[in-house]
Amino acid sequence: MNRGGKLAPEVQRALFVKNLRYEGIYPSPPSRYNVSSEELFDLFGKFGPIRQIRQGIANNTKGTAFVVYEDVMDAKTACDKLNGFNFQNRYLVVLYHQPEKMARSESDLAKRQESLEKLKKQHGID
């Protein structure tokens, strides 16, 4: 918290959680190794009412989840307490969801790819 009781600008109700256990890492049966929604509600619900939890199901989003709280202070407390927390033998990474930052990184990637293509042509590399 900043002076005067104001929250940092990145603090919001939606949290992005990484490093959750999922079936791609462990052998069968998958249901035994996936983190369930109930387990996430139990863990994150200790810090306040939750509006929604969405787990990643695509190959590039497995092991991630979005947790949305009703109140921003509950989200802040959960982020502070659970980032680095050992949950099911894995250390959680809990961040504030920042969609504008993700959009910027995607546009930066496109610019970098364009620049790379120009350099390849300039140096005769395929």
Image: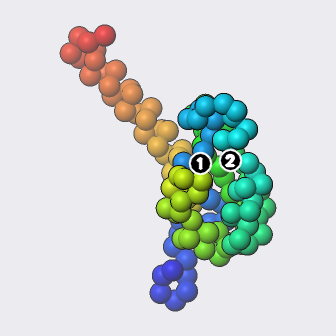
| Marks 1 and 2 in Cβ contact (< 8 Å) | yes
Residue at the left extreme?
A: 123
Identity of the residue drawn at 43% across and 39% down: 108
Mark toward the start of the polypeptide (1 vs 2): 1
Identity of the residue drawn at 54% across and 44% down: 103
Find disc 2 in the rendering and name its residue.
35
Give percent across and percent down for residue 67.
68, 57
The picture quadrant where one finds residue 119 is top left
Q: Is residue 81 above or below residue 52?
A: below
The local secondary structure at tag 1 comes to loop
Residue at the bottom extreme?
A: 4
Within 10 Å of disc 2 (Cα), the crowding (few <14, some 14-19, many 20+) is some
Under mark 1, the amino acid is: Leu
Identity of the residue drawn at 43% across and 35% down: 109
Q: How many marks?
A: 2
Give percent across and percent down for residue 120.
28, 17
Find disc 1 in the rendering and name its residue.
20
Give percent across and percent down for residue 22.
62, 40
Asked which colour scheme the image uses, the reply is rainbow
Under mark 2, the amino acid is: Val
Q: Is residue 93 visible?
A: no
